[in-house]
Amino acid sequence: MKKIVILFSLIITLLYPKGNVKSLEIKENGIEIAIVYPKIIYKGETIKIAAFMQNERNYAKMGGLTLSFPQFKYSKLAYVDNTFDNISSYSPPDKIYSSTLKRNIRAKYYMVEGWEYKWYRGDVKSFYIEIKVPKNLDEIVVNVRGVLVFGTKKNRYEVKIPLQSYAKDQQGYPIKRIIIPIENMQTTNKPKKVISESESKQPKTSTGTGFFINSNTLITNNHVIDGCKELKVIRTGFETTATTISVDKNNDLAILKTKKKSNIVLKFQNQQKVRIGESVIAMGYPLGDLLGNNIKLTTGNISALNGLLNDFTKMQFTAPVQPGNSGGPLLNNKGSVIGIIYAKLNNNIAQNVNLAIKYSVAKMFLDANDIEYEINQNSAKQEVVDIAQQVKNGVVQIICTHD
């Protein structure tokens, strides 16, 4: 499979002369999947995506490789090359099979699937598609998954890849997710921005919070770093600069790489579910200089397992937060990160409604960018003061200098 990925990476690299190519590779339980796609795409252009799946298990009765596009209801897609027995696309209201309900359901969004009968061990199947980039999106999200089917009737069983995930597609299958950023078409001879003398003397700054998930990588909110010309990362006894590696505008997340390393990193919750009512700790740098530049801590509880308008990628909590807390960690009583703080509700109707992005969404974003992070294996509850002492040096203030 590695040789095939390299070969087709070279083919697509010829189509993208600047080497604008990436690949997602999944190898689990005797099945291998590789997706080759461009690193960056431009609004309105046509892109190429190559998809491969190899069976290294025994003979399978059938199997398939599926790419789905949760942002698309329908798409005009061309199959440039295909070695599967069948390749099909589905759009609402087409019928598709739900693995969780064990029956057909209506499709919610666009998907394309290559399907093979009599899949022998060692066989590689592929399809190669072209799709036009919509002009109203800032990124394209692609869900990837495969399945092999063995046996018949009562002895029938499926082997899925990935084996487990923090997200599922519309059919209930675990997925890996690719996020491809979309940029405006590059133009030349842009008029230069005229900056007044007063603006040039007083650069504008804003602040937020982030935390280390490995020695020189931070996660924070996209809105904390959006439009920043320079990024400075500080805490007591520590100061460095940072650059943006990747952003997920839909989920308001960003990954930063720092020049200087941290000895302390924060660890994510394991697969145990977050429960309503459980105790939480919010840490960060609210209100910048007004409250002082030292880290601040508040406590509360999970008040709801969804965000506004039933957004199940978010959750609500009661630990008080302020502007500047954005991007900071929300921790449980074991010291695990269960969320990334991103907003509070300011109105005259609801009180103490604070919002965090679920840790599972953050981990998917990190997985999509091949970023290493740690899982907290500690199962014992700890005192708040002990958790604060352990993690405080991994939580930093982010200072953004705007143009």
Image (tube, rainbow, N blue to C red):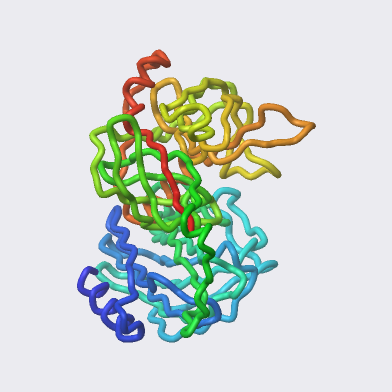
The residue lying at 56 percent from left, 74 percent from top is: 89
| Above or below for 284 versus 136 | above
The residue lying at 32 percent from left, 30 percent from top is: 236
Front residue of this view, candidates 157 and 99: 99
Front residue of this view, candidates 350 and 363: 350
Q: Would residue 81 appear left or right of 251 to someone viewing this image? A: left
Front residue of this view, candidates 276 and 354: 354
Residue 153 visible to an observer of this rendering: no
Name, please, the residue furthest toward the right.
Answer: 349
Question: How far across and down, in percent of the image, does residue 294 sit?
Answer: 41, 27
| Above or below for 91 versus 265 | below
Front residue of this view, candidates 210 and 166: 210
| Above or below for 266 versus 88 | above
Q: Would residue 381 appear left or right of 1 to someone viewing this image? A: right
Q: In which quarter of the image is residue 353?
A: top right
Q: Quadrant of residue 233?
A: top left
Question: How far across and down, in percent of the image, does residue 195 sit?
Answer: 52, 66
